[in-house]
Amino acid sequence: MEPLTLVTVSRNYFNMPLWVADHVGFFADEGLDVTVELHEPIDAIVERLRDGRAQVGCGVTEQVILDAEQGGSLVIVGGNVNKLPFDLVAAPDVHSFADMRGRTVGVSSLEAGSSSLVMKLFEAHGLHHPEDYEMRAVGPILARWDELRAGRIQAGLQGIPLNYVALDAGYTTLAQPRETFPDFQFTSLNVDREWARANEDTLVRVLRACVRAHAWFYENREAATDIAVAETGVAREYTLRAWDDYTRDEIFPRDGDASDAAVATLIEVSALIRALDRRAGTRPADYIDRRYLQAARASLVAS
């Protein structure tokens, strides 16, 4: 078995294709002994891909774009969260965006991730950063939920299924970003280009396992939920609702691919918020290398 380290963010539902590939045995079928490492800071994913501590990352897509702007060699090789699985959840006493004036929103990072989305949503309701509200980097979904419950932030994007947990606990929903942005490449499978070129066979086998995992996820509601409960610790009633939402809206791509339309939306939103003209003029295809996924699919069809 070939050892391989795959890094991803936190214990959230985004990781279901990876957990499926592990639990169901798709990685093992490819002769891969995959260690899935979970990290809270989203920057840890990029750092480990850059220095070789990890070979594949399931991370925030905007970080690949930021890396490219800085002359880096990260590239998208597969899809993950191609549509936004979030609600903008707020404290029980917050009933409108106006109630957030002078208060604090938690984001995963000030440089990437949820910050661009948050700023765009607030701008649509007449609130601008930093004059109207504070934005604080507190980490990904689980950390934001902890901060919200502790009262250290008053709002933050909360992912499915924790959005339902929050609503049942008395928290409010200010917005559902998926309604504003139907396609948005929030996370993706990312690698270093040089590692990919030197390890094409390994990467193709990783992607074969992931393609199979995506297809299996859509066909196995109960078994997928068993895995979700075991890995996230979230109650079954909520993880069942997560499966329903993810499959209904095809948040995970059925074919395992990234979406040009979703990357284009990410580029547009990020560029408008950050006034990065060079990014706004860049094509989504510049950040995606599909040759490995295409090889994986072709070999699955052939077999």
Image (cartoon, helix red, strand yellow):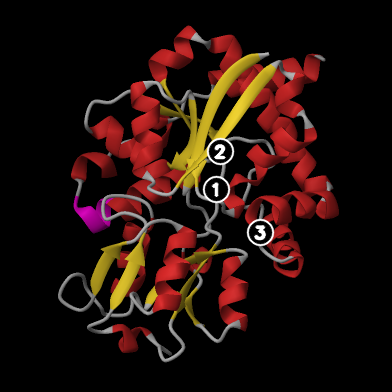
Give x and y (percent) for residue 156.
41, 70
Question: Is residue 26 on the magenta stretch?
Answer: no
Q: Is residue 288 left or right of residue 152?
A: right
Is residue 215 depicted above or below 302 in this figure?
A: below
Mark 3 burial class by Cα count in 10 Å: few <14, some 14-19, many 20+:
few
Q: Is residue 161 left or right of residue 241?
A: left
Task: Tell me the magenta residue range.
Answer: 271-275
Specify the quadrant that holds the C terminus.
top right
Residue identified by numbered label 3: 233
CB within 8 Å, label 1 to label 2: yes
Residue type at numbered disc 2: Gly
Disc on the earlier residue, 2 or 3: 2
Residue identified by numbered label 1: 82
- Res 283 seen here: no
Give x and y (percent) for residue 205.
65, 18
Q: Give the tally of numbered discs.
A: 3
Mark 2 vs mark 3, foreground winner is 3
Can you tell which quarter of the image residue 15 is in?
Answer: top right
Disc on the earlier residue, 1 or 3: 1
Give x and y (percent) for residue 91.
43, 83
Is residue 52 depicted above or below 190 in this figure?
A: above
- Res 169 seen here: yes
Residue shown at the point (19%, 52%) measured from the top left: 275
Mark 1 vs mark 3, foreground winner is 3
Give x and y (percent) for residue 178.
52, 64
Q: For this rendering, which residue is in front, 2 or 295?
A: 2
Q: Which mark is residue 79?
A: 2
CB within 8 Å, label 2 to label 3: no
The majority secondary structure of the magenta stretch comes to helix
The Cα–Cα distance between marks 2 and 3, rounded to whole angstroms, is: 25 Å
